[in-house]
Amino acid sequence: MLALALPLALGAPACVRAYQPISGLQAPVVVNPAHPNLDGVQVALSCQAWPPLGPQDATRLCERVGALLEVQGATILEESSDSPRQAGTAPSAGADPLALPGLSPAPAPPATSGPDLRLSLSARVVHRARYPLSWLACAATATLVPAWSEATFAQRVEIRDARGALLVDRELQGRTVRRFGAGAVLGALVDRVARDPSRQVTGPAADRALSADLYGQLSQVIYNAHVQDRARRAISRGPG
Amino acid sequence: MEWVLLAGLLLAPVLARLGPAPGLGMDRDELRALQCERLALEAAVREEPGRVRPGRERGDYMDRSALRCRQDLVPPGLRPPRDEAVLSTLGAQAQALGARAVASTPRAGPPPTWLVQAHLPDPAVAEKLRVATQLALVAQGQAVSDRRPLLSPHQVEALAALPPAQAWPEACRAWAPQLGPGEALLVVLVLDRDETALHAGRCAAEGWSWLS
């Protein structure tokens, strides 16, 4: 009876999310996303809706990435997703896994010419699993044993120069694990209480880590493309 | 008895590590030290024989795949980020640089003997990259020489004042007389202190050409 009573005492069984970078998302980042790395660079941004997040989330991602680039001094010329926003518009408020940590965009100057870089973001679900046996065990133990489900996602980043030449084509992969039940809640509590905040992996820490990884990688990849584009222009102009 | 059962149930998911998953079994630093890839079941059975059970003939009751991970040799955070960016993917970057060099070779005439130089802020990392690129070129069937053309201190000083787009072609003019017949110099470099991508150029008797 005690085993049945404990989950109730802990409160309603809940879902706990954890995040793991699979490949690319944990790569080293040299640029500081809060510095004006892209001063004066004009970027055309497009985000394609994809099944796990839907059109509204794609629009929100575009807003966040646009704000991230504006913080770094770029001008967002256009955004093509299901509901485009004007350059310089602040992203919608509210807690979400894609929130920009501690950054607020500067007002963007009006666009005057074509883009220097064309950034296209798209994503896909690589794998999804629900582990039915864990759900059976979860039900049989009054949610003391957590039920598991997980999804592996891939974020593709494609950057082209003004003439359409491909500068960057990268895929960043991550994994989200969801655990359900009183056991999962207890595990998340232990994670929060026993671990240093920089080593936590569940709940808000997972959202912060995903945001930091995604926006850090985007900042680095776009900066690399910017340097390459600048070098190509200098080379094509020739000496003098 | 109930307490023992309860403790067992609560500890089961912690003790039973269901693969490298974020949770009480692995913290953030441990997870970030893993480089993983998701493999389809067929590929996992083929590439990891004996470790992944093949699918049943009539199909499984769930969609199965495998997550294959390897641990970084050096834990993240011990090296500067740019060095880490180069060294954590050294093999792949050297392979790509070698392939770009080979693709840049004119089809007419015999393949060149490659001399390799790497210009990165940290000389130790540059040396590692140089050797890895040489090995990648050898693996692609190319002839490689360990000889290095040099610049005088005056030339280095003059070149340092030029923008990269001019400096490297000028450096090539200084290197070219030092190259033997049939030799080409592959130069690997970074153009900006904050970028993690590498650039490459080819210096030969006919002059400098960018490979990026």
Image: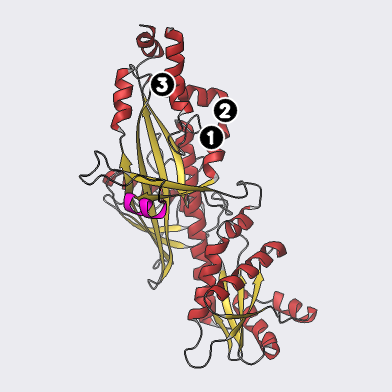
Say if residue B70 shows up in the picture.
yes
Question: Residue B10: image x %, image y %?
Answer: 44, 19
Nearest the camera: B126 or A76?
B126
Badge 2 amino acid:
Arg
Frontmost of labels 2 and 1 is 1
Say if residue A111 shows up in the picture.
no
The mark found on residue A201 in the picture is: none
Badge 1 amino acid:
Asp
User: Badge 2 sits on which subunit?
Assistant: A
Which residue: 69% across, 64% down?
Answer: B121
Residues marked 2 and 1, same chain: no
The mark found on residue A183 in the picture is: 3
A25 left or right of B176 in image: left
- Mark 2 sits on what residue? A195
The mark found on residue B27 in the picture is: 1
User: Badge 1 sits on which subunit?
Assistant: B
Question: Residue A167: image x %, image y %?
Answer: 44, 67
- Relative to A137, is B164 above or below? below
Q: Residue furthest right?
A: B153
Badge 3 amino acid:
Gly
Which residue: 43% across, 65% down?
Answer: A117
